Amino acid sequence: MTRRFSAPVEPLVETNVFRQRGRMSTDVPDIQDIRPRLPVPVFPEDPNWETLYWTAWETVWRAIRPPSPDSTLVACHPRPFPNGAIEMEPTAFVANLSGYAPITPTPVELLNNFYAAQHEDGFIPGALDTAGGADFYDSFDPNSVGPNLLAWVEWRYFRLTGHKERVAAVFPHLLAQHRWRRANRTWRSGLYWTTAYAGGLTNQPRVPGTRYHHNHWVWIDASAQAAVDAAMLERMAVLLEQPAVAEEIAAERETLIQKINAEMWNEKALFYQDIGPNDQFSPVKSIAAYWALVDPQLVPRDRRSAFIQHLRDSWSFRTEYVLPSLSADSEGYNARTGNGYRGGVWPSLTYMVLRGLGVADQHLLAHKLAVNHLEQIAHTYEQTGCFWRSYAPETIGPGEPGQADETGLTAAVIVPMILENILGIAVDWPLRQVTWRRHLERAQGYGVRNLPLGSEGTVDLFGVGDSVSIRSDVPFTLAIHGDQDIIQMAVPAGSFDISLK
């Protein structure tokens, strides 16, 4: 008789309300109905950015689907891939828009499908079958989990909205998943492994022979994502007043940071790289290494400048159109088409790097890279009439293989790039704070209208030279970063003009 393995039960999963609920609201509101509630970028001299912004919202909304009547899915989902899989990565990036879409149901609820599918041992599948809602892969398949993004997205939603109740609802399930990954995706050293398929960079030559297998390597993106996940969970535990859990997660994160820096930093290349079973470094430089920047404590100060410099060097990642998934000086780099992850520019990866640069206080560099990237996307849209999953690194046009963005993934990162990196707006609503980094220089000014401030109101900001116009429903603190100075002020509800002189 064959005995089936029974995984140990994670007690936290017993509290998973998403596994116990029936189907939630699955109506997809019309984009024209929700448009009046969305933030409005104002670019008098750059109407192409406004067009790109609204086209991105429309594209995302067209990609959202209700579950089929006979499916066990509990919420809407992005359009699946041709194989029928609803993958965690595009779902997470669409959910990332939730802080800018104060609607019901909010996009963050797309993640509920994955929480509802959590196993008793804490495993959350990286892909679900559209037809029935079942796991797309067995949990012990090396390719069963995708990039570790859930806590990163949920914490961002909290910082934009202040919705602590959402954190309380999802925290136990995120912690259970983290413990499952720690138990099932690490080596003896405590560093993490994945596969090219599960990590999302399927044909990148960073680890030989690992499209569907780990090949006993340690992977920099999986390890750095684990540190980021731990950082988000630690913050959640502190917010929810669970000091014992915060201490557990903080200790693991500290160990991860120490081991990543001791073992995965290639001093010769001045770069973080995957390492093989014989302690050899990967022969290439992957954009995936920049997950290390997303954790504010992972990259030591004495390494940060050299690591970021690769994003400025034209022979590395600063190609004509940024940012290639493989550095230009790596063997296998394809300058003409990108050839998938051998140099293709993938908007979600570019957005990840921009977020990391923000954590590292490199906002001007992030702004310049975003301008370059969005101009490439805009020009290609003008030529082809659609968004693409990837773009060529050194010519205007889609990457190869040419795959249109069907899931809304590319469109979903255009919106925050425009608001956060082009306009320079950042909201931290639990602190009641808005930061505006005015990197653009426009004679006619620029700004934003109807920017959500949690669930309490909206703000309009418009600046021309040294004058800024403000309208707000609620009081908050505004910090304006100019070329040299930072001006911080308490903003009351109402409308008024201020001078920055």
Image (tube, grey):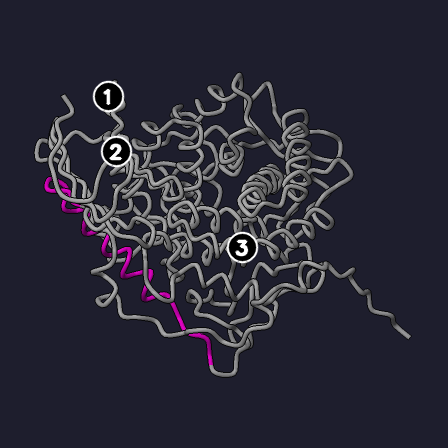
Residue 29 quadrant: bottom left
Q: Amino acid at mark 3?
A: Ala
* Front residue of 281 and 260: 260
- Decide if residue 192 is on the left or right side of residue 285: right
- Mark earlier in primary sequence (1, 2): 1
Q: Which residue is mark 1?
A: 483
How far apart are the alpha carbons under marks 1 and 3? 40 Å
Residue in the picture at 52% in, 78% down: 71
Give the CA distance from mark 3 to mark 2. Answer: 30 Å
- Magenta-highlighted residues: 42-68
Tell me the kind of residue under disc 1: Asp
Q: Which residue is mark 2?
A: 490
Q: Which residue is mark 3?
A: 168
Of the numbered discs 1 and 3, the one sitting upstream in the chain is 3
Local packing at callout 3 (Cα closer than 10 Å; few below 14, some 14-19, many 20+) is some
Q: Residue at x 48, y 47 (%)?
A: 155
Mark 2 surroundings within 10 Å by alpha-carbon count, few (fewer than 14), some (14 through 19), many (20 or more) = few
- Where residue 427 is drawn, which disc sits there? none
Tag 1 near tag 3, CB within 8 Å: no
For the residues bearing labels 3 and 2, Cβ distance under 8 angstroms: no
| Residue 61 within the segment the image draws in magenta | yes
Q: Indicate the amino acid at tag 2.
A: Ala
Q: Secondary structure at mark 2?
A: strand
Question: Is the Cβ of the residue at disc 1 closer than 8 Å to that at disc 2?
Answer: no
User: With respect to residue 60, does 226 lie above or below?
Assistant: above
Residue 33 to residue 409: above or below: below
Secondary structure of the residue carrying numbered label 1? loop
Q: CA distance from mark 1 to mark 2?
A: 21 Å
